Amino acid sequence: MKKILILSIIYLSTISCNKLLEEDVRSQITDSYINTPTGLEDAVRASYSYLKNFYGGSENGASLSVFGTDTYTNGSDGGNKSINFYDSGFDARNGVVTNTWNDMYIAINACNSVITRAPSITGMDEKLKNVRVAEVRFLRANYYFLLVRMFGAIHLSTTETQGVVKEAKRSPVSDVYKLIIEDLDFAIANLPTVATNYGRATKPASEFLISKVYLTRASSAAKQPDDYSKAAVFAKNVINNYSFRLLDDFAKVFDQGTGEKNSEVIFSVQNSKDPLFIGLGNRLHLYFLMEYDVAALGMTRDIANGRPFKRFRPTEFVYTTLYDKARDGRFEKNFKRVFFCNRAGTITTNNGKSVNLKLGDTAIVVSDIEIPTAIKRNFNYNFFSPSQYTERIYPSLIKYLDPQRLNVGDETGSRDFLLFRLSEAYLIAGEALMMSNNGAEAANLINVVRKRAAKQGANSAETAANQSAMQITPAQLNIDFILDERSREFLGELMSWFDLVRTGKLVERVKKYNPSAAVGIQSHHVLRPIPQDQIDRTLGGKEAFPQNPGY
């Protein structure tokens, strides 16, 4: 799956673009190529490549799912701050919104091309063909699931589109969910339990996704009475019916390289170190880092510490309130807060002391607690208490750091994006059971994740005490606890905005925990604006393809 052949279906794009057409000519791939077994295989591989557009290949996915939430606000740099501020710059002409909409429909049409053409292709084993169609139906379901959660009623297309199409309409949310579930039912029935090539869609990945779909639909306008029960059943299938297991150490889930292919990963978006096939790569290593690379702090930019774009900064809620730091090890394992000198010399620390730093000396400490000024003046390094955090100085998320990049300026990264993890199956099942008034089983499932998260003690007795303290009772369960637990486990993993909207908590928790976003956020921000380009190019304009309320 690493060597994705994107150009084989570029001509299938629903969006007219001269650059894409030029690339198609250069590739010398004809329209009839996809009608061959080899062409279909390449088209299926290419359908996976569009996952990267949202999951790490650019800022877009993170900007639409991390920004403007209870857990992340803006750093100092970047042009997408309006998404966090919910101000007038976040409108129907916003480039992030437009690009994401277009990317998803290009991806959907790539999937539709396989679905449309597969029946007429000869010379290919029918069972294998069915598996390939099931793969792209899994992918199409995911692309539509992203769209319906962000935009609500959207245009539905289930067959290949070629040429210019000006007619479009917004189908009801219920119809979108119906198609998503039909696609995933087909995928579950036809995909193997274990992929022939790592990275392909599987039956357990499809069961995971449909559990999340049911959980989300359960609180939507399209909700059905059995949505929560179905979400729990499919999530527990993933937990109980396959060989997945939680790793003993939360941090090990994100070990780069072979560690990313671990027993906890149900489905991931593949990336490669090979410069021929890296494509967009995974760029999330750029966006969650503080500005450490300042000579006055005894540091210069290097590969190990990353290239800090300073886009996403954790809210005060994250580093002061979210974690039980005495018992929960995930705070320490999520954040990098100490930097060691890689630029020797004499500096004046931020606390006013002149020190001579040698290579390897502690240069920066980003503390999660306040220390009296008189004590800080004795430190032979820069010490930042929470009250000294700025848009440039704050705890840096570890899980996307990419020390295997080729050089210090490299923006692409080779990390896989871990899209579905087993720990989320436990939390999906737990939430669904809680909402079904089965708090006892819900707490048991959530406690599996919390036990793994417990801080390791100095000895086994202390570790056991931490594990015991991390256990919750059914009485402690409510939707805010679920959201907090999901944030602790999946911080920065492109879920926050979706979780807040799904649970009806977006406005409340943003106002409570994100002061930069609190001023601008309004009730209509539970949906993103329909791109103006889409409205303008639709025959009949806004009457045929109306804008979401409030934009």
Image (spheres, rainbow, N blue to C red):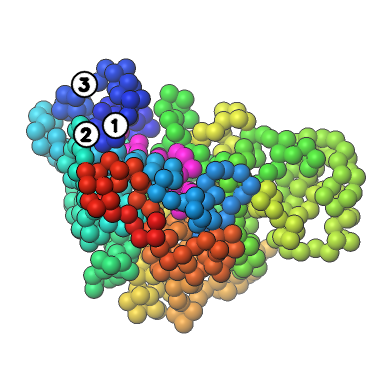
What is the three-letter code of the residue carrying label 3?
Answer: Thr
Which dot marks residue 164? 2
> Which residue is at 83% across, 37% downward?
358
Q: Marks 3/1: CA distance?
A: 17 Å
Q: Where residue 30 is drawn, which disc sits there?
A: 3
**For residue 532, above or below residue 249:** above
User: Which circle marks residue 219 in the picture?
Assistant: none
Location of the N terminus (image quadrant): top left
Q: Nearer the viewer, residue 49 or 109?
A: 109
- The residue under label 1 is 16
Residue 287 image position (x, y, % from top left): 56, 44
Q: Main secondary structure of the magenta part?
A: helix
Instruction: Look at the picture and state if 141 lies above or below 343.
Output: below
How many marks can you see? 3
Q: Residues within 10 Å of mark 2 (few under 14, many from 20)?
A: few
Hey, what amino acid is under mark 1?
Answer: Ser
What residue lies at 16% left-to-right and 41% top-to-bottom? 159
Q: What whole-number distance in Å separates the C-alpha atoms at marks 1 and 2?
A: 7 Å
Q: Which residues are magenta?
A: 45-67
Q: Does the segment drawn in magenta span residue 153?
A: no
Q: Position of residue 147 (x, y in %)?
A: 32, 51
Q: Secondary structure at mark 1?
A: loop
Residue at screen point 22% across, 59% down: 172
Label pair 1/2, CB-CB below 8 angstroms: yes
Instruction: Please say whether residue 208 is visible from this viewpoint.
Output: no
Task: Give yes or no for residue 49 being in the magenta stretch.
Answer: yes
Q: On the image, which quarter does residue 241 sit in? A: bottom left
Marks 3, 2: nearer the viewer: 2
Tell whether 245 sits left or right of 71: left
| Picture quadrant where residue 537 is located | top left
